[in-house]
Image (spheres, rainbow, N blue to C red):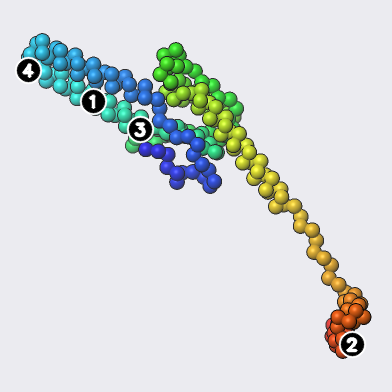
Amino acid sequence: MGFDPKLLNNNEEILLDLRPHWWFITPPAALTVALIIAGAIVGNLIGNQIVWWIIAVLVVISLLNLAWKYINWAGINFVITTDRLIFRSGVFSKKGIEIPLERINTVFFNTTLFERAVGSGDLTVESAGEGGQQRFDNVRKPQLIQQEIYRAMEINKNQEFEAMAQAQAAAVVAPPAERALSIPEQIEQLDQLRIRGVITEVDFQTKKADLLNRM
């Protein structure tokens, strides 16, 4: 199940939503296959009904364990957004951690020779605050995830810069409105219009009288 978009903040976007590496469920899967093969061999060699029942019970237990492991795998979200790094796990009850991108200092990854071959590894995120370091196991291609986190941090920084620039632009004081003309100045403008023939003498005298009555 993917990360619920309803849990995102305003203008926040998901850049990456991952499950753990498939190696997370490989051991119980390999154990189940091994039990089925070994059970078939032993059962055919011995041919005892009790042995068959024991093998069947062991296989069923192994299959249940594999199913539970898969459900846990499907319930893990490793998410990178434009604002945060989010890790959540759990089936019936959820637990997790959220690290704001602006608080991340450094991202480390560690892979063994085998993990490099299968594309798995561990990721450690060092952040400011009480958490300090947070380690994530069974991460797919951790070196690429490291680069993706740094890219998300750069996007976040640019968004903050743009928001700050917009806030500063909005805070700029608008130029003062033009000063209203006084009544003598308005009469002078009317007189200029009369001289140029824009208004008649009657219009000039009427408007002039109206302005003088306002004084």
**For residue 50, above or below residue 162:** above
Q: Residues within 10 Å of mark 3 (few under 14, many from 20)?
A: some
**Sooner in the amino-acid sequence: mark 2 or mark 1:** 1
Measure the C-alpha gap from mark 3 to mark 1.
16 Å
Instruction: Specify whether 19 is left or right of 130.
Output: left
Q: Does label 1 or label 4 sit earlier along the sequence?
A: 4
| Residue corresponding to mark 3 | 74
In depth, the one of 8 and 191 nearer the eye is: 191
Q: Which residue is mark 1?
A: 63
User: Label 4 belongs to which residue?
Assistant: 49
Give the x, y percent position of residue 114: 41, 14
- Cα separation between marks 2 and 4: 126 Å
Determine which of the numbered discs, if any, sits on residue 201 in the image. 2
Q: Which dot, 2 or 1, sits closer to the camera? A: 2
| Amino acid type, mark 1 | Leu
Disc 2/disc 3 C-alpha distance (Å): 90 Å
Name the secondary structure under disc 3: helix
**Residue shown at 55%/27% (left/top)?**
147
Q: Position of residue 105 (x, y in %)?
A: 60, 27
- Asked if marks 2 and 1 touch (Cβ < 8 Å), the reply is no
Foreground mark, 2 or 3?
2
Q: CA distance from mark 1 to mark 4?
A: 21 Å
Say if residue 138 shows up in the picture. Answer: yes
Going by the numbered disc 3, the residue's amino acid type is Ala
Amino acid at the residue labelled 2: Glu
**Disc 2 to disc 1, how far (Cα)?**
106 Å
Residue at left 44%, top 12%? 113
The answer to whether residue 67 is left or right of residue 115 is left
Q: Earlier in the sequence, mark 2 or mark 3?
A: 3
